[in-house]
Amino acid sequence: MRLRIAIAASAVLTALIGSAGVAPAHAGPKDDLIQVVRQILLARSRAAAPDPQVNLAKRTTGTWGFGTAVLPAPATAGAYPDGWLFIAYRDRRGWTAALEGEPTFADLAARSPILSADEKRAFGVNRNRAEATALDRRTGLRLPYALGQTWRLTGGPHQMSGTIRSSIDLAGGDGRVLAARGGLAYTMCSSGRGWLRVIHDRGFATDYYHLSGNIAASGKKVDEGTFLGNIGNDVSCGGSSTGAHVHFSLRYKNKYIAIDKFNVGKWAIRQTAANYAGYALHGSKRVNVGGGLYNYGKLGFRQGVVDTNGSTKVNRRRGPGTNYATVGQTADGATVDIVCSARGTTHTGRDGYRTNQWDKLSDGSWVSNAFLWTGRSDPLNGWCP
């Protein structure tokens, strides 16, 4: 939704703002901008939701605005806030403001002199990239804590906003929450506490809620593994929390996306019928809620995780099919590098996935794609010559 308020025309202001009131005559452009963004949020708000939070970045001027806009959640279990970055421009007719996910957001971002080159690039990618589908579930993310640590999966897939199960809960280890991938970080809540969003490449973003001692950021460039905050129970933007943890959410193209079957740190997250239930798979190893997830690091975009669908090892062959000699075996859960792919004999793997695609590995051997988790059902690195 886009809203333009003509500051000079009080009748128009009254018609658009209504009972929320018009910024007084002595109010400056920044006050008017807050009112504009508030009205956008109120138009999206749920019944009985707390007042919106509009947080202007320090770089906001009388002509260009930028910041975060949050619809806080009621202070009840299972309720979560919704939040966006916003960009605004003011001309003689007033402010035009747009939230993440709206076409005007990317258009304004391309023109805005108060955004960094990295921000313009990231917001432009989100405008143009095609939707993620079941055919490409690679994220490039690791688990949001130190490599080699094991944290508990305290909550399986559940929502951050609406009904989409975009999120999991994690706790344990040293309690230090780290960026799951490099990107641009933003503090979301007016308090400056609790909630960070990191915009990554390829149209993805991750949210981290309930943090304590988190960094302050407004477009701060962070690397994979950068400290973001500690697990906690902060509810500066509403909701509730029992037991220190991080509520970790996946976004794609400026909106929450179901985390089911996407990979995070060489684990494929799986949802079941109930919120907060579900499990994670690393090859055939299944970890249910309450179990520990070892941080293996990220899965490369041309790598796969061996998933034998219950066996301990998979055969490697001299060519793409069972008619070729066996040259060795690779353990379930191992990470392999894929050179290219070819057609061969057909096999059936997990969830009835049936394919005649075989993948050539970096050592020259071949494995059926039915027994690899790659995040795609087509070649990661092209067809072999």
Image (cartoon, grey):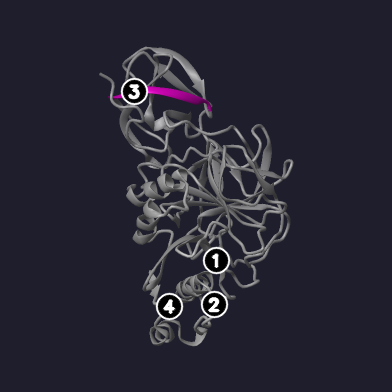
Disc 2 packing (10 Å; few <14; some 14–19; many ≥20): few
Secondary structure state at the residue bearing disc 4 = loop
- Residue topped by disc 3: 340
Residue 191, position as x, y percentages in the image: 67, 63
- Residue topped by disc 1: 70
User: Viewer-nearest of labels 2 and 3?
Assistant: 2
Q: Is residue 364 above or below residue 272?
A: above
C-alpha separation, residue under disc 1 versus residue under disc 4: 24 Å
C-alpha separation, residue under disc 2 versus residue under disc 3: 63 Å
Q: Which circle's residue, 1 or 4, is located before the other in the chain? A: 4
Q: Residue 341 in magenta?
A: yes
Quadrant in the picture for the C terminus:
top left
- Residue topped by disc 2: 27
C-alpha separation, residue under disc 2 versus residue under disc 1: 22 Å
The kind of residue on which mark 2 rests is Ala
Q: Which circle's residue, 2 or 3, is located before the other in the chain? A: 2
C-alpha separation, residue under disc 4 versus residue under disc 2: 10 Å
The kind of residue on which mark 4 rests is Ile
Q: Which circle's residue, 4 or 3, is located before the other in the chain? A: 4
Secondary structure state at the residue bearing disc 1 = strand
What segment is highlighted magenta in the picture? 334-343
Secondary structure state at the residue bearing disc 2 = loop
The kind of residue on which mark 3 rests is Cys
Residue 127, position as x, y percentages in the image: 35, 52
